[in-house]
Image (cartoon, coloured by chain):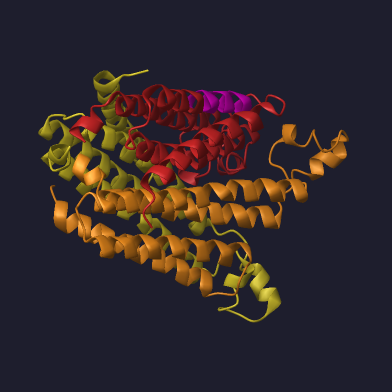
Chain colours: A red, B orange, C yellow
């Protein structure tokens, strides 16, 4: 495993997993940006910094379409990127062919960047649906590889 | 670790973790199915495919009870399956007894399938609560094993 | 890797990751506590145990401020603790200096406990914002270390 962990496949997995998880974290900052620029918060204590007037502060607790859109995109990341990381890690440990593995990681990470841009900019469908499906297909392909290599019930 | 990774315990973990993560991904498809069959969407651009009438499209953005139920079930998966995967991975690396480990994985994965069926079909309580608790207990048992084997603060 | 997995850095990662994931699971119990004590549920079948009167049961399906607060805190845990676990695992495998690694893990886990207390008790800002940022900074520092050590595109 010193051997497996230092393998190019594992290094590639580490690189792409880190990049795509950083992209996921970026959604938090985008949420904060929209909350501040549109003055739309979830918590009473967060409105204090913006205004002291209770009536004004109450209005800031209403849901905001832009904030909700970014949060849905973030949620979709959690629902798709975490399965990729889990299954990708196990896949990287099954000693797959380097170039096959690299293309799985690249296609997945690329699809998630396209998904985020499609979602946040509300680009007409099916751009978002397609990028979502392409990401899942690479995850399914890796899951198939793990199950055929490692099956032990 | 080549040795640890090729161990039966690690193969079993890989198998069960992959299966239960695939089950989690399945919730996305169930959400899409309900969104389409009940015409209930979250994004304006998603309603275009179904209708061109703005009034009709607005109605499709209302929340739908069946969609929300599946999404709550998916969220519960995220909150329980990810901790299992993290703690289960560390547990699998502590060289536990194979049969003990297998039963932890089997009980957890079984409990999550029962949980999903109970949730989605709205089976009367306490079926859902019990399956949730049984899954957590196997996670706690593995966490205890990790902390007693690997404690380093 | 037997060597990497048995290293003090990996044992430390296992310990802190397990502790912070258990803290995340604790949020589920806090949600259940508030749901029961304030009689605020999401599912019709969950209200049965409390009352047989349909009118009363319908009222229990309204959202409750305390429940929603805990759920937002739980969601923030998912969005921050999972990236820590993923990037921290990869970081622990890059053979970092033990004391540097230990301080990354300790600061992150400490920041999340402070974040939870700040959120749940609605302590005035910027306590919650600061604890959130400190946790992210340790994650970014580990991600930087992974990308400079393992970069393979």
Magenta-drawn segment: A109-120
Looking at the rendering, which quadrant does residue C144 occupy? top left
Q: Position of residue A99 (x, y in %)?
A: 41, 21
Viewer can see residue C6 = yes
Tell me the residue at 53%/56% (across/down).
C65
Looking at the rendering, in which quadrant would you find the N terminus of chain A? top left
Q: Position of residue C110 (x, y in %)?
A: 24, 44
State the image quarter where residue A24 is shown: top left
Q: Residue at x 25, y 24 (%)?
A: C145
Q: Residue at coordinates 43% horizontally, 50% vertically from top-left?
A: C74
On screen, residue A151 above or below C131? below
Q: Is residue C122 among what the camera can see?
A: no
Left or right, residue B113 beside residue B69? left
SS majority, magenta: helix
Left or right: C134 in relation to A80: left
Q: How many marks?
A: 0
Q: Is residue B31 above or below residue A120?
A: below
Looking at the picture, how far across and down is residue A126, in whole percent?
Answer: 70, 29
């Amino acid at each position: 495993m010193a051997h497996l962990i230092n393998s190019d496949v594992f290094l590639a997995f580490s690189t792409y997993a880190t990049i795509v998880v950083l992209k996921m974290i970026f959604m938090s900052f985008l949420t904060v940006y929209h909350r501040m620029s549109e003055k739309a918060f979830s918590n009473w204590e967060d409105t204090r910094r913006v205004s002291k007037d209770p009536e004004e502060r109450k209005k800031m607790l209403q849901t905001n379409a832009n904030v909700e859109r970014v949060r849905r995109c973030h949620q979709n990341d959690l629902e798709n990127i975490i399965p990729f990381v889990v299954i990708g890690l196990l896949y990287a440990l099954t000693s797959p062919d380097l170039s096959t593995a690299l293309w799985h990681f690249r296609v997945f990470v690329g699809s998630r960047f396209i998904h985020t841009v499609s979602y946040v900019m509300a680009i007409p469908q099916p751009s978002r649906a397609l990028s979502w499906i392409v990401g899942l297909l690479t995850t399914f392909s890796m899951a198939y590889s793990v199950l055929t290599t490692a099956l032990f019930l």
